[in-house]
Image (cartoon, rainbow, N blue to C red):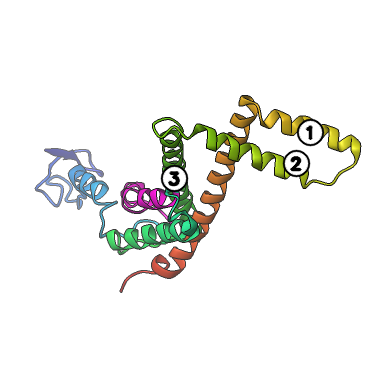
Amino acid sequence: MQDICHRCGSTVSRQDGFCPVCGAPQLHFDSSEQVALDENADTPGSAGRPGQVNWKVVLSGCARFAIPAGILCGLPLVSAGALLWVVGAASAIILYYRRKRPMAVLSTRSGLRIGALTGFVTAYVSLLLSALLRVIVRFPMHNAGSIDNEYEQYIHSVASNMQTTPETQAQLSAYFHFLLTPDGRATLSLMYIALVAVVTILIASVGGAVGVRMFAGRRVA
């Protein structure tokens, strides 16, 4: 390949360090070197920009930790430890990220973002599993009657424990009557799903920020 001399405009070969006509030193740019630099810009051994997140590594960590955490949160026998599972999954993903990219420096904001994604995946898996178990109990196990009775008793207990004025009581009675209808049950279920998802994401975000403080806030020597 050939270039043009920047001083006199003569044709200069890539092998020539100086122009054969005017003797001016030549600087040659090899585009293949730039491509190699671009390809290596996001390798595990490179530091990258402070706070930059490699989301492929994060998604890989979610598959290893967030999905199992969601399963634990959705199982009745171990769901009581949901707070531990969610925070532990977010922190574990941060630690996993640091091991995969030891030179990377994550900021607290990056930890919040990683934790939010962890919480979303955990909540999705947990709610999906809970819904699947409820379908199994209702239909294959033929326990629809017990589920409905439990739901109705809960609504009646909440309604009876609320002390309000007669005008407000009438409005609440109409509202609780609506909750006993199929549309009311669907509305309450959606509200519950949204609440669980938001709380899970917030908790996981905190876990991600804590994980950054503990595991990935500084470079590895």
First along the sequence among labels 2 and 3: 3
- Name the side, left or right, on which 143 lies relative to 26: right
- Identify the residue at horizontal 84%, vertical 47% (top origin): 163
Q: The residue tagged with tag 3: helix, strand or loop?
A: helix
Which amino acid, by three-letter code, is at mark 3? Ser
Which amino acid, by three-letter code, is at mark 2? Ala
First along the sequence among labels 3 and 1: 3
Q: The residue tagged with tag 1: helix, strand or loop?
A: helix
What residue would you read off at disc 2?
159
- Identify the residue at horizontal 26%, vertical 47% (top origin): 38
- Identify the residue at horizontal 52%, vertical 50% (top origin): 200
- Name the side, left or right, on which 46 lies relative to 130: left
First along the sequence among labels 1 and 2: 2
Q: Are marks 3 and 1 in contact (CB under 8 Å)?
A: no
Give how far across and how far down residue 173 sits, in percent. 79, 33
Q: Which mark is residue 173?
A: 1
Which amino acid, by three-letter code, is at mark 1? Ser
Q: The residue tagged with tag 2: helix, strand or loop?
A: helix
- Name the side, left or right, on which 38 lies relative to 191: left
Q: Are marks 1 and 2 in contact (CB under 8 Å)?
A: yes
- Identify the residue at horizontal 44%, vertical 47% (top origin): 74
Is the residue marked by circle 3 packed among few (<14), some (14-19), or many (20+) residues within 10 Å?
Answer: many
Q: Nearer the viewer, residue 124 or 98?
A: 124
What residue would you read off at disc 3?
126
Question: Residues in magenta?
Answer: 51-73
